[in-house]
Amino acid sequence: MIPDLGFPPLDSDHRHLLEMLEDLIRVAESSADADLLEDQSLEVTASLESHFAKEERMLEEVQDPSRLLHAALHADLLERMARLTGAQLTALGPLGAKDVLEAVAQDLIAEIAKFDVPAVPAILKLQKS
Ligand SMILES: [Fe+2]
Ligand SMILES: [Fe+2]
């Protein structure tokens, strides 16, 4: 289950990111070629990067006290995902790639749950002004 923050712009990003990861897991499981895995893995990494940057901007704008800790969680996930290149996923084999990608998806869900929901009203207020 993806935690619902009650903040549609981030909630829809989260659903989309997890769908992309699930697609990549399906491709990795079906022994796809390294080029296809590489394309999809780069796409996931780029989408994660832009989502994390968006969230970090929001948290920075409202000077959220947990923003540095939260950004560190982002950096860790991004680094792990960036290492999972097409070549790496191919080398892990279908089951190994599935396991490692599922662990990233689970940790992304845990990371989403750590977003500071009490910051949402301040973010909304700032966006309206
Ligand atoms: Fe997020
Ligand atoms: Fe986050």
Image (spheres, rainbow, N blue to C red):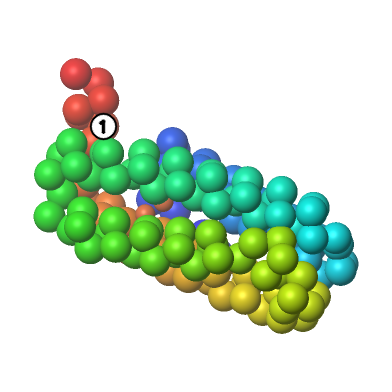
Estimate the x, y position of residue 42 in percent, counting from the top left.
Answer: 62, 50
Quadrant in the rendering for residue 115: bottom left
Under mark 1, the amino acid is Leu
Estimate the x, y position of residue 36 in percent, counting from the top left.
Answer: 80, 53
Estimate the x, y position of residue 17 in percent, counting from the top left.
Answer: 57, 50
Estimate the x, y position of residue 97 in percent, counting from the top left.
Answer: 71, 74
55 or 81: nearer the viewer = 81
Q: Residues within 10 Å of mark 1 (few under 14, many from 20)?
A: few
Q: Looking at the image, is 113 positioned above or below residue 61? A: below
**Residue drawn at point x = 85 percent, y = 60 percent:** 33
9 or 35: nearer the viewer = 35
Whether residue 87 is visible to the viewer of this picture, yes or no, is yes
For ligand 2, which image quadrant applies?
bottom left
Q: Is residue 81 left or right of residue 55?
A: right
Q: Which residue is mark 1?
A: 124
109 or 42: nearer the viewer = 42
Figure quadrant of the C terminus:
top left
Quadrant in the rendering for residue 96: bottom right
